[in-house]
Image (cartoon, rainbow, N blue to C red):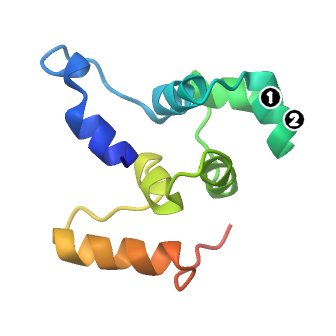
Amino acid sequence: MTLNERLTNDSSSEGTGIEITFGSLLRGLRKEMDYSLNRVAKTTGINISYLSRIERDMEPPSICFVQTIADLFNYSRFDLLEAAGKIHVNDLSSEEREELKKQFDQGLIIINK
């Protein structure tokens, strides 16, 4: 299931006015995979303080960070970049979005870091 599907199906925030942020998504994904901040830091080489600031939404993630985390947790880079606000596809049809995602995940589209 993609992060966007998880957001769409997440009934815990419906009607509560709670905003689901990239940091909370990252924290949930990390805990779901049973990774500590320290384990993520050691595995990826990302500074633990930077990880913590992103999870607390104190700092926006870089494109490189998002791609590294997507690879670590075996999630679509496209979906995580979209969740982080680095890709905006609101004006595309679902078919166009899926084709763009397919091309991106196959490496046919590259985002400069």
* Numbered label attached to residue 101: none
Q: Badges 2 and 1: C-beta atoms under 8 Å apart? A: yes
Q: Position of residue 87 (x, y in %)?
A: 42, 62
| Amino acid type, callout 2 | Lys
Q: Position of residue 68 (x, y in %)?
A: 69, 52
Q: Residue at x 51, y 72 (%)?
A: 105
| Amino acid type, callout 1 | Arg
Q: Which of 102 and 56 is in front in this view?
A: 102
**Vertical placement of residue 7 versus 87, above or below:** above
Which residue bears the numbered disc 2? 42
Q: Distance between the residues labelled 2 and 1?
A: 5 Å
User: Quick one: which residue is furthest to the left in this view?
Assistant: 15
Horizontal relation, residue 48 to residue 1: left or right:
right
Q: Which of 94 and 22 is in front in this view?
A: 94
The image quadrant of residue 3 is top left
Horizontal relation, residue 3 to residue 12: left or right:
right
On the question of residue 105 being in view, the answer is yes
Disc 2 secondary structure class: helix
Q: Which residue is drawn at 58% across and 73% down?
A: 111
Total labels drawn: 2
On the question of residue 92 being in view, the answer is no
Neighbours of disc 1 within 10 Å: few (<14), some (14-19), many (20+): few
Which residue bears the numbered disc 1? 39
User: Quick one: which residue is furthest to the bottom in this view?
Assistant: 108
Q: Nearer the viewer, residue 53 or 37?
A: 37
**Vertical placement of residue 17 versus 2, above or below:** above
Horizontal relation, residue 51 to residue 12: left or right:
right
Q: Residue at x 81, y 34 (%)?
A: 41
Q: Where is residue 50 in the image (x, y as percent from the top left)?
A: 75, 32
The image quadrant of residue 93 is bottom left
The image quadrant of residue 15 is top left
